[in-house]
Amino acid sequence: MFALVLGAVRARTAQVLTILVLAALATAIVAAGPWYGFAAAGRAAGTNLAGAESTERVVTVRQSIDTQGKPQAALDRFATGVRAGLRVELREPVVGLTVPLTVRQGANTLAMPMAYREGFCDRVRLEGRCPARSGEVAISQEAATRLGLAPGDTVEMRSSNFNVPLMARVVASYTLADPAGVYWSATHFRAESGLSPAFTPVDTFTARQLWGITAAYDGELPAALIRGDGGYDLAGELAQADARLGTNQLRFATAARPLLETIARDRSTILSGVLTAGVQMLLLTWFAVGLAGWYTLRDRRADAALLKLRGVARSGMLRLAWGQHLIPLLCGVVIGAAAGYLLAVALTGPVTVTADRQQALVWSAGAVAALLLGCMIVLAVVETVVLARPVSSLLQRAVTGRGDWRSALADVLLLVVAAAVLYQARAGGPAEGLAPAASALAALALALLVARVLSRAAGRAGGAALRSGRLRFGLTALQISRSAGTDRVFMLVVVAVALFITSFAGWRAEQTARADRSAAEMGAVRVLTVEGANRTALLHAVRQADPGGREAMAAVVSRDIAQRVLEVDTARLAALATWRPEYGAVAALPAAMAADTRPSPPVVTGDRLTARVSRDGAEPVALNLLLQHEATGNRVIAAFGTLAAGAQTVAAPLTGCDAAPGCRIVRWEVTSPPDESGRAKAPPAGAAVTVREVTQSGSDAPVLDSAALGDVARWRAGTAGAAMDVTAGDGALHLVGDENTTNLKQISGEAWAADAPVPLPVVLAGAAMADWHYEDPALQAYGSPVPVRLTGTVTALPVVGRSGLMVDLDAVRRLAAEAEPAGEFQVWLAPGARSGLVADLTAAGLTVTGDETVTDRADRLGAQGPAAVVRFALLTGTAALLLAAAVLAVAAAVDRRSVSARLTALRLQGLPVRVAVATGYAGTATLIIAGLLCGLLATVLAAGLTGSAVPAFTDGWQVLAAPSALPPVAVLVATLAAFLLVGLVGWLSLLPMIRSLRETGR
């Protein structure tokens, strides 16, 4: 038997190679699926983890403790209890503590907690030395600027529970070395309101004012646990840890749960999507192999008849037939399995997790085994059906069609299944159940109907055409109607074309969706994340590096209560931003700012200011003028001291305004005279001061003359508490304290330079905050409340999405003045920005910590589940088209001999060679063109019936409307590609017959 099998294999090399190629191609795809799926899931998890904010990787446990003057012992007990209850090994856990305290800034009280944290000095840049003794503190650079403190000074800090202040000695100011890092992700060690904490050694907390602490234990979750390597359920473990810690009054908090859910969804999306595509490929392969086996069986019909005449049993003939198929199938499976693994590695890299690697191996082996076993069963069924026929039927040269009831029943069942799946996809969504296979099943249903209609119509039209003398059309129609198996080849072509067009169009649409999202999230084609001292320094550095305003724009992403705020340099917005119709008119905010321009007083560059003032009230008051350097943003105070009654000329020294471009005037401040400790309180009732002129050293022109001081449009009162009455007239500025101060906790003595529009123009995306419905709209994040007015409401904005605000950065930094709320500093770059621009920004004082393009972000999104599934679907769609082309080649090659014989006979009877050649081409060409058109129609119908759309992003991002799942250009390209491939295969298959017909005609 083995020798007979080998002989049969050698005798039919073409048939064997056909089965081998089909098996190798299909095996490569189904074998690659599990390797691709698990590797893509691991890559998606790694990408999600790398793109997550540091707060999403951190666990925090806190507890309120009374230390009884023994802070270190209390911290040790706390840390031991946390580790016992948490039971999750964290990376680099850190213990710290905080106590809420306040400090005075002029007449205002600001929150500035006292804090201790392990490793603090290693995570900051210090100007001074690290605090090492009890009572020594390091304060933030912002606090040092706003409070006017330097190393060596003493700061008075107060607790709400004690009347006795705590005196601390400042030994350094600090700036965060890595503000986006894990160490600083704990918000309780950052400025939540007021000033950043003052850090001190743990021994300082022995002071009685500091016994009531909030202890904190922070640590980063290991990447392997977040990814869920080996099936580890981190979400479940954290839930149990929360319950255990809660029994000991330990407050557990983490923002990791959304990240864990995203990773789990990505994994499920990828594995289920790859499984769906793999099952489709298996079914299509079994059908293609069975069809190829049925066609190649025609050459073995005579052998089967001969074996029957010799008395060979049906089982023996089946073993011989199986043997002929088993050899190419096994060879194809071996080649395809190796190629599939290499293909998966090339597409998405190796599977790095051991447990996933073992699962991938098992699933890949199972898929290959299922393919091999299914092919053998299908071929056995085909062989059995044919071998069951009598010898007379096997010896017939013509093959009968497939018109029995079994075929009709199979077609009806397929139509029922297709209709059920289409209904499910329409009712439940294009991603539920068997809905992802809706396109293939719609194509199958349409192909069944069209094949039945086409076969009957071709038979009747062919006879009529021959009777009327239209030989070319008549012969072609009869060839289609009488060729057994043509309907099944047609169905395969239709399904393969539909899968290929759907997958190609979906891949292109998914790319577009990622590109649109990336541009919307970034705002520009390239964005630098930078560190700068403040908003003023950021704006000055960008304008200095790009004075023309065509290559770079400063931007800050901040937050006001529940809404994100995008602060942009509106003068450069149109030139730098990637704008979409959803954002409204790009000129809306710049136009609003331009329509409300305010004159700015001259900058101050001297080292001394002189003012002509008068104190009009009975109570003594102190007068200060606050300035801000226009390049560094540093706060400079001109303290004119306590004013005497009546008119007088007072002077104040200045330090820090002589460097270009100088300082701008921010506000006047009237307070009570400082006490012995230097503290100043709110102005007394009835305080009144008139300012008539301000001059600076080294200049004859006044800084503020009677025109500037007497123009009320140049000055405004404060927006918090009981504001001063600010009036202007007779060439002077009048500042009078508000008499209505009853029950008001905050009394303001400020008069601000009105060099920015108030209310501030803003563009709003989405719904306004709930508070705006009951009181005047205002932003709370910039020190004093900033009133705003809406210049437009849009559906979305760059960066902030469907819920947020866009404001002018220059106006914000003027209104906020020395207040510096947290935010992410960015520089948006134009597509053609010169290569040296980054170096110029660095030279201007910015530190570049991140550099990302729209392409970079789109590539990162491409590692998520939907993108990975779409890519694998394109791979299977391409393989399906290749399978269909191979089966078409087999069918054309098998039919070629009978068609050639008929056409040659007709040639001898006088049929023109032109008609014979056209008829030889027309049958296969008609099959190909009809299959392409039907496949295209099935794709469009499936999309319309199921409402198919581009797969949603794993994290649920829906700021912009998703693009069409069938982009017209992509559909056209895919259709042309399918036509070229299938048409080329068909042409090459018919070429020998066409040459023979042409030679016969000579």
Image: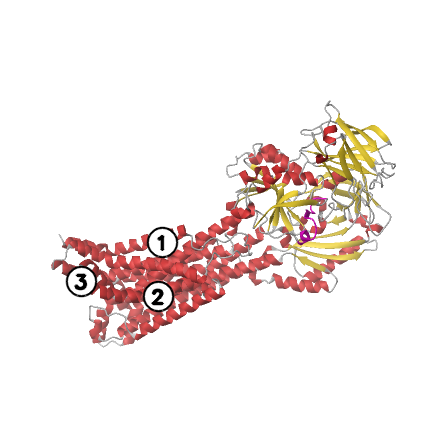
Q: Is residue 880 visible?
A: no
Residue at the front extreme? 730
Range covered by the magenta-colored residues: 770-783
Task: Give the x, y percent position of residue 568.
Answer: 60, 41
Image quarter of the N terminus: bottom left
Quarter of the image where one finds residue 666: top right
- Asked if residue 303 lies left or right of residue 197, the reply is left
What's the residue type where badge 2 is placed? Phe
At 37% from the left and 51% from the top, the residue drawn is 973
Task: Give the x, y percent position of residue 495.
Answer: 36, 61
Q: Which residue is mark 3?
A: 466
Task: Give the number of the disc on residue 975.
Answer: 1
Q: Nearer the viewer, residue 937 or 726?
A: 726
Q: Which residue is mark 2?
A: 287
Dot 1 or dot 2: first in sequence order is: 2
Q: Is residue 932 visible?
A: yes
